Image (spheres, grey):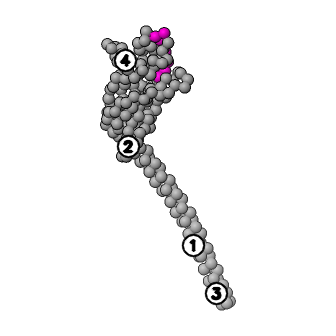
Amino acid sequence: MYDLPQWPTLVQAGAALVQAGTAIIIVILTARLVRATNTYAALTKTSVDLAKKQYEGDTSPMWFLSLRQSSNHPETIRLTVKNLSKMSAIITHVLLRVDSEENSEARSFVLNFGLSGLDDDVHDIGAHIRETLNPYVVGGEWKGVVKVEIVASVGHPAIQIPSPSFRFAIVIRDEQVLSVKPKVPGIAIEQQSDGGAQR
């Protein structure tokens, strides 16, 4: 015959086993929930980072600068400024610096023209280049590299943002600019056909 006093012990043991099993299931489900939450957080962060990068790409300045010498008028050196971003800007200055001379300071010249997103404009800066290089011309000749940058006013309120440097090899002979060539073709960002060069 069964010993009746053993039944409470068996019931308690069964209840303990059920509780232990339930606890294990809760731990497993909690661990999976934590893993799923971490995965969701990581995916959300990645999505936000991509959206932020896309937004900054659309609203941050990105420029392409090129210099081209006129074949009919060698004294005319045209600076083409291409706005590769969707943000409009006002180009306030062009900065010219002799790269191959020690302690050379950038010369700043006023441009002051607006440029909408994905647009371009052309300006003659031949006189500015000659003024910048005159102190280095010896015997009517000079050969070296000039860094060209622009300063743009963007945003509300407006802030001044310089572009990366574009480098151009320039040769002067008989006090006239003989040639203007880009050093390294490329694209510059806050970073391009017509002869651009990146720092």
Between marks 1 and 2 in the image, the one whose residue lies nearer the viewer: 2
Amino acid found under the numbered disc labelled 4: Gln
Image side of residue 141 versus residue 78, left or right:
right
Residue placed at 64% from the left, 80% from the top? Answer: 13
Q: Is residue 10 above or below residue 177?
A: below
**Residue 1 location (% of width, % of height):** 67, 90
The image's mark for residue 158 is 2
Whole-number angstrom distance, CA of label 3 to CA of label 1: 21 Å
Q: Secondary structure at mark 3?
A: helix
Residue 162 colored magenta? no
**Residue 35 location (% of width, % of height):** 54, 59
Instruction: Say which quarter of the image contains residue 16.
Output: bottom right
The image's mark for residue 22 is 1
Which callout, 2 or 3, points at the residue further toward the start of the chain? 3
Which callout, 4 or 1, points at the residue further toward the start of the chain? 1
Residue placed at 59% from the left, 72% from the top? Answer: 23
Q: Would you say the residues marked 3 and 4 are in contact, meaning their CB atoms lie under 8 Å apart? A: no
Image side of residue 21 versus residue 89, left or right:
right
Residue placed at 56% from the left, 63% from the top? Answer: 31
The image's mark for residue 9 is none
